[in-house]
Image: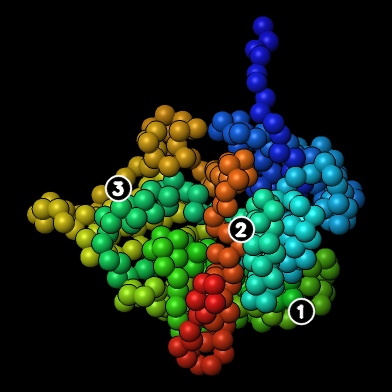
Amino acid sequence: MTLPRQQPPSLRVGAVGYAFMGAAHAHAWRTAGHVFDLPLQPAMVALCGRDAAAVAAAAARQGWAGVETDWRALVARDDIDLVDVCTPGDSHAEIAIAALAAGKHVLCEKPLANSVPEAEAMAAAADQAAQRGIRSMVGFNYRRLPAIALARQLVRDGRLGEIRHVRAGYLQDWLTDPSFPLTWRLLASHAGSGALGDLGAHIIDLAQYLTGEPVTAVSGSTTTFVTERPVQGWVGHEPRGRVTVDDAAVFTARIGAGKTLGTFEATRFAAGRKNSLRIELNGAHGSLAFDLERLNELEFHDHTADQLTAGFRRILVTEPGHPYLSGWWPPGHVLGWDVTFSHEVADFVRAIAAGTDPEPSFADGLQVQRVLDAVQRSAASDSAWTPVPPPGG
Ligand code: SOE
């Protein structure tokens, strides 16, 4: 028997880029409409990449119906409603602004851009597009972890009281081997910055999201441990090229109008740490701690409880009432890293259908960019305290 299925109208998606992030987004576009009841059903219309053979192979593997080899052709297609930008940062601004001008909704990978002026232009284009009902969102996917969304609810409900400390780190180790090749992520011309923008951007966004307050000033240092690496694609005596981004960044920060202090660390040289994102908040009435390597859990300490029995307790964030869990499995049947992207596109689709502006907005992405820029300026001036221009400023 064939079951009748009332298909919602479709939202026709085109993506630019099919490497790591492109593949993660494709997985989300394939999945979201089958896990959640969405008001619009994502249709994977076309994938764009410059290498015709490679993009055709990726499209077949990832489930895209067609291909393009020039993003301008993708943006010009009238059978596409949304453009998903999964390219290195140096092309985000040009593609996103053109897509918004062409009336396409835009999902753009993080960090929003490679510089503050680019991010400002993107935020301005997003503002103008929103007046025409065109929506945009930046892909800070970790906001969509159920445990992080629950943490946000607890902060918003006042369970932590005034927040005193944010302690955040995002640690990886894939660059510890000096023979690892010089990829685009190690070139400022393509990536903007290194660990700072790639990993630091996530924890800056999480700190601002969880506290609901912007970072107002920073004092930071950055370093590059391995300054030359083999140029990719050569076998044998390959030439070496200069690494033009940071390998690691640390900074302290002031957050919001109150007295909140933050410490942040981003590195690709923490041997043994594969993808370790940790964030802890300490407030007047309690604390929260999250570790991406245990992403289904949130630690919560209620400091107002009986002190003899109080302490951090582990919440397994898999109850049907927890954020995003309604679509998934019964309690205790844990979720993985990939669901952050499914939740991200599901939220974006719902906002488009509802005619509301989704978060994180391009303005939120711009604010993260301003913090990244301030850290770089501080690092260049012997860690001098450096103000971050306020949102809207
Ligand atoms: C690479 O370091 C990377 O893929 C980042 O670009 C992602 O944003 C992060 O989620 C995982 O690590």
Q: For disc 2, does the CB lie below 8 Å from ligand 1?
A: no
From the viewer's perspective, is the residue at label 1 or at label 3 nearer? 3
Of pointers 2 and 1, the one earlier in the residue sequence = 2
Residue 264 against residue 336 in the figure, above or below: below
Most foreground residue, 332 or 129: 129
Q: In the picture, which quadrant includes the N terminus?
A: top right
Indicate the position of residue 105 as horizontal and vertical percent values.
70, 51
- Residue 203: x %, y % from top left: 48, 65
Tell which tag, 3 or 2, sits nearer the viewer.
2
Residue drawn at (76%, 79%), measured in percent from left and top? 241
Q: Nearer the viewer, residue 184 or 358?
A: 358
Which amino acid type is shown beneath numbered disc 3? Arg
Residues packed near mark 2 inside 10 Å, few (<14), some (14 to 19) or many (20 plus): many
Q: Amino acid at mark 2?
A: Val
Q: How many numbered marks, from 0 up?
A: 3
Q: CA distance from mark 2 to mark 1?
A: 31 Å
- Based on the displayed image, in which of its 4 quarters is residue 78 positioned? top right
- Give the position of the C terminus as an image quadrant: bottom right
Rendered image: mark on residue 52: none
Residue located 58% across and 79% down the image: 373
Residue matched to label 2: 138
Tell me the number on the disc at residue 241: 1
Q: SS class of the residue under badge 1?
A: strand
Q: Where does the image place residue 205, in percent across and percent down from the top left?
A: 50, 64
Q: Are marks 3 and 2 in contact (CB under 8 Å)?
A: no
| SS state under label 3 | strand
State the CA–CA distance, disc 1 to disc 3.
47 Å
